[in-house]
Amino acid sequence: MTIELPALCDLPEETIPGILRIENSDKDETTPILVDMLRSVYPHNQVFGEYCPVNAYIAAPPREVYEYLADTRSLEEWTYSLRGFEETEEPGLWVSDDRIGKNTKIYTRTVANPDAMTVDYHCAWDQGQHLWMIYLIRVVDAQLVFNKPGSVVLWTNCHHPFYDKNPYPETAPKGRPVWVGDFWDMFSAGHQIEMDNMKAICEYRAANGLPIKPKWMD
């Protein structure tokens, strides 16, 4: 995989197997993987209809994991499709490309609490005035809950009604065939891929004596 963005530039190519990003697995290649992760032994909507929870243990220090996630630019590394972050003229508001949508800009503001180690990403496609897509993340010291070093990351999304219908169609790029809510039924599987990416990246850096938050974010 050729890395042209600063994301993961501190690591040699192909050193972390199993990471799925849009650069090495496009939407068509990844969709069957997502579908295979959805189990038919329970009603998917019953479990993931209103909320999408994804959790993981990460063998890396919790404060360092928190500080990594609290930097909006970390999304360029561990998310599947958010790339090219630039801060807008409004301090703290970033714009990037969501490559899962055609010509789609996504706006992100990170609201972080260092005492509680919570990181909430307030996002929206197409416009940055109403950030209604809220990604709620909490980092927990694994010593407290598992009696071992490391981090537990809890991540939940809520099914905002705007996922069902674009509230700002006038801001959408012309000819885009999809809306973010079209993917809600795959959020659980898609977010699990991203959580696995986060875990792999943080654990690799921790195991190899590298800062969890890379120097290019300083």
Image (cartoon, rainbow, N blue to C red):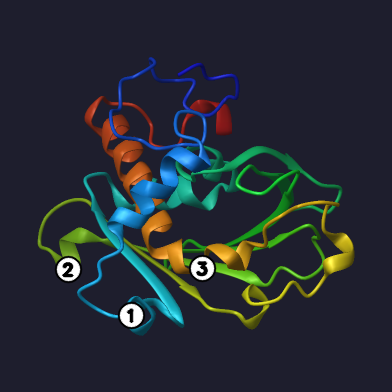
Q: Closer to the N terminus: mark 2 or mark 1?
A: 1
The front one of 28 and 210 is 28
Residue position for label 2: 145
- Give percent across and percent down for residue 207: 22, 30
The answer for how far apart the CA atoms under marks 2 and 3 are is 30 Å
Give the left or right position of residue 201, taking residue 112 as reference.
left
Q: Quadrant of the C terminus?
A: top right
The disc labelled 2 sits on which kind of residue?
A: Val
The answer for how far apart the CA atoms under marks 3 and 1 are is 12 Å
- The residue located at (60%, 24%) in the rendering is 5
Q: Residues within 10 Å of mark 2 (few under 14, many from 20)?
A: few
Q: Nearer the viewer, mark 2 or mark 3?
A: 3
Residue position for label 1: 47
How many numbered marks does the figure carry? Answer: 3
The disc labelled 1 sits on which kind of residue?
A: Val
Give the left or right position of residue 128, taking residue 165 as reference.
right
- Give percent across and percent down for residue 41: 20, 74
The front one of 171 and 78 is 171
Return the residue found at the far left.
147
Mark 2 lies on a secondary structure that is: helix
Which quadrant of the view contains residue 161? bottom right
Q: Kindly identify which numbered label has been placed on residue 184.
A: 3
Q: Determine whether label 2 and label 3 are within 8 Å by CB.
A: no
- The residue located at (51%, 27%) in the rendering is 215
Mark 3 lies on a secondary structure that is: helix
| Residue 195 vertical position relative to residue 7 in the rendered view, above or below | below
Q: Residues within 10 Å of mark 3 (few under 14, many from 20)?
A: some
The disc labelled 3 sits on which kind of residue?
A: Trp
- Give percent across and percent down for residue 96: 70, 44
- The residue located at (16%, 51%) in the rendering is 149
- Give percent across and percent down for residue 204: 28, 31
